[in-house]
Amino acid sequence: MTDTLLDIRELKTWFATDDGMVRAVDGVDLKIGRGETVGVVGESGCGKTVTARSVLKLIDMPPGRFEGGQILWQGRDLLPLGAAEMDKIRAREIAIIFQEPMTSLNPVYTVGAQIAEVLREHEKLTRRQAIDRAAEMLSLVNIPNAKARVHDYPHQFSGGMRQRVMIALALSCRPKLLIADEPTTALDVTIQAQILELMQEMKERFGMAIMLITHAMGVVAETCQRVVVMYAGKVVEEAPAVALFGNPRHPYTQGLIRSIPRVDRAAEHKERLEAIQGTVPSLLNPPPGCRFAQRCRFASDVCRQAMPPLKQVGPGHFVRCVL
Amino acid sequence: MASAVVLLAIVLAVVLGPLVWRVPINEIDFAAQLAGPSWAHPLGTDDLGQDILARLLYGGRISIAVGLCAMLVAAVVGVLVGAIAGMSRGSVDAALMWLADLFLSLPQLPLLLLIIYLFRGALTSVFGSQGGIFVMVVAVIGGLRWMQVARLVRAQILSIREKEFIEAARALGASKVRQVVRHILPNAMGPVIVAGTIDVAAAIIAESTLSFLGLGFPPDIPTWGRVLFDAKDTLDVAPHWALFSGAAIFLTVLSINFIGDGLRDALDPRRVL
Amino acid sequence: MSRQYLIRRLLIAIPSLLGISIVLFTVLALAPGDPFGELASNPAIPPEVAASLRAKFGLDDPVWIRYMHWLVAMVHGDWGFSFASRINVDTLILQRLPTTLIVIGAAQILAIIVALPVGVLAGTRPYSIFDQVANTLAFIGFSLPTFFTGLLLILIFSVRLDWLPMVYRADLGSTGWTWFVAEIKQSIMPVAVLGLFQGASLVRYVRSAVLDVVRLDYVTTARSKGIGERKVITRHVVRTALIPVVTLVALQMPVVFGGAIVTEQIFRVPGIGSLLISAMLSNDTPVVMAVTFVFACLVVLFNLIADILYGWLDPRIAYR
Ligand SMILES: Nc1ncnc2c1ncn2[C@@H]1O[C@H](COP(=O)(O)OP(=O)(O)OP(=O)(O)O)[C@@H](O)[C@H]1O
Ligand code: SF4
Ligand SMILES: [Mg+2]
């Protein structure tokens, strides 16, 4: 990695709740290079969304707070930045799209107005110019009849179409990094493929880096150069996609990869999906050692005593496991 | 919590107060006309030299009784209408809900005034002047406030009708009335209690308003609103008269509203309004 | 907002007006004696005149025919004659109505100016000190009956401080600038009483609507656009939070009219509220009926306005 855009170091984002401190993100390291597509995977509740939102400081505070670490954007730490400085990064440098296209657009404004809003904020444009640019963006994301549809409201679009609008909105200021938080989870399978294809197309056109958060290992295998595996607020493995799928080292990653449904082994499908038993441990008072220990086949006393460090096992391949 | 204490104190005062503070409410004493608070008259006296504390303690009974009874009327009518609407569905349901909407958009106070204006004579001849007004005020205030409860009960019925235990009761051949009474109402109680609590406050305000406009209870029945009505013309010389009666209404209503709000938080933390 | 939506709303208003008129007429028909027939049954009036009066009022017809007659008369603005004021009821009401509307309108504006920012601030900082203070004050505000607030204001600003006149005078006997100042001075207290009462509930409506909206996804989207917190709140939170608030305000209108009657009575504002009370005290039945009917129409009218506002604020509505 020669040109690092984003360098998250030891990030800790915690939430103060009635039951105690939820350590949703508890010392995460993550790097993204220019133009690179990085997949972030892990099961529900492991802190993917919190990590993604932390980058743009979209965490509600309270209850959330940054307990430590750094988020270096092109070498500059974002955590100490004030609101005004942060607003210059948002949308212009880093943009984000969310899982739920049905609710992530404001129902009372036309989609054109919502895209124009961000354009007018960051580029000196008149209302007319901004709407024209919005229409351009919409046709770029393959929305038919874009010139007319800028004046439509979100409820007049289908879920897949709204996600296209969200992509148009996110890319309208040409950000260097697009964070996509499970952009296809809420969509039909056929639409999912179209959206992923669109993102690929946009990447080729604009050359931005993508942080793709997903549950679907299959999607990661197809689109990402590098993969970060998270478990209970920690990164447990990080590797180039080829290495990760060819030679997964962490028992949790191995479980995840085994759980990918494969057509050629349909008979074993069911059993495979159950490969990882048990649930994510509580983030309230995590045990001191490896957080996967309760579910790990290879767990030993060493694992439970102290958190294993992230160690290098190959070129760009790191794993947090004593094995 | 503090509001519960305040309300309890007020209720105890009006229930037990007249037993302890044995000054008659209508003892006229022109020597002590419009006197400020003193040992003989802790809250002062009015224009006829009557003891305000005694009058407020006695009148509070009526005001609070009106509030409670009107709430009961509203709750009974509301539960009945809501239960019928929820169990029958179809056109009966639609008609009853339309009626509830209609009642919600009635101008309450003018209507209340109108009814009292038209029926006052007839009712006083049947129930006597005190009883007649009481029955009428309670019936009308309650009769104009059942809509909220009806909606809550109906919504509750619609949402739990299909749940298993109702299905089971139905399979066992429980009658509709029995289903409602045994299974559905207990589940709907929470929101109904909240609505009922707030209705008590609203009814007390409604009664006070009527009396304050001179159209509620007659002067010999010193409900809080009536006392305030009598007090308002001597605001310049005897402000204590108006202040104490107004404060009684305000404190009661405020503490009931706070309790209602607390109950809502306790029973249904999701709703904010 | 589509044209159909407007028309549909207008059409829905008609049955509710009819329903209200039926309720009013029922009350009237059930009332003991013949409220309208007082003249007809007055022994001082010769029997022939009484009989013609009975015929004119249709007192001997079946009830639904009487209802139709009454309704037609109401719709035609033929509201009868005020026994007390010796003029036609419609003229009387038309004289008084503007004052009431001005007081209510001014109070509504005052309520919005105070409550909107307070409610938004409280809703965006839930459980902060500001929120708790605002919430408590709002609670006190709508637990204070309007008649008590009115007396308190009179006590403080008229009796003690002597800053403002105690009662409202229709003809001030002055002109130009002095008239204007006097008009403002005498309007302050009635408007404040009504406005603060409405404002108190409005604060709670706005706060809870804002609380509901701030956690929605599109607000996070708005934040991610880098447009600044101020624009996020005004354009994205407040704008959508207003939609439920409009409905709640409309639901509250009947209570507001009640407050207006009390306020007018306390300050002797010559509007239809004080007219209603004085008509009742002088047994002027045609006026009582007509004013009640006017209040009912006003409630329906404000509901209609709220519906139209709602459709204008929420683009999803017009297409449903
Ligand atoms: N505002 C909050 N208050 C308290 N806890 C929170 C808050 N937001 C997130 N969390 C906690 O942080 C943890 C991580 O949540 P996060 O949304 O990042 O998971 P995720 O990996 O994105 O899961 P999913 O795949 O379901 O989207 C969860 O346990 C959640 O309970
Ligand atoms: S450290 Fe131990 S418990 Fe954790 S994954 Fe490795 S082997 Fe399993
Ligand atoms: Mg997530």
Image (spheres, coloured by chain):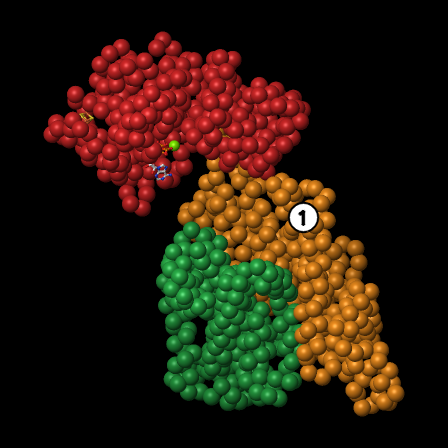
Chain colours: A red, B green, C orange
Q: Quadrant of the C terminus of chain C?
A: top right
Foreground residue, B62 or B238?
B62
- Residue C195, position as x, y percentages in the image: 60, 57
- Residue B83, position as x, y percentages in the image: 50, 65
Q: Can residue B259 be seen in this snapshot?
A: no
Residue in the image at 41% along x and 75% along y = B11
Q: Picture quarter containing residue C236?
A: top right
Foreground residue, A313 or B67?
A313
Foreground residue, A86 or C316?
C316
Q: Note whether C34 is above or below A129 in the view shown.
A: below
Q: Which residue is mark 1?
A: C308
Q: Can residue C257 be seen in this snapshot?
A: yes
Q: Is B204 placed left or right of C42 in the picture?
A: left
Q: Note whether A194 is above or below B68 in the view shown.
A: above
Residue farthest right in this picture: C48
Q: Quadrant of the N terminus of chain C?
A: top right
- Residue C252, position as x, y percentages in the image: 59, 58
Residue in the image at 72% along x and 52% along y = C10
Residue farthest front in this picture: A267
Residue in the image at 47% along x and 23% along y = A193
**The numbered mark 1 sits on a residue in which chain?**
C
- Residue A93, position as x, y percentages in the image: 47, 20
Q: Picture quarter containing residue C96?
A: bottom right
How many residues crowd mark 1 within 10 Å: few (<14), some (14–19), many (20+)? some
Q: Is B147 placed left or right of C32 in the picture?
A: left
Q: Note whether A120 is above or below C186 in the view shown.
A: above
Foreground residue, B193 or B91?
B91
Write down which quadrant ligand 3 falls in.
top left
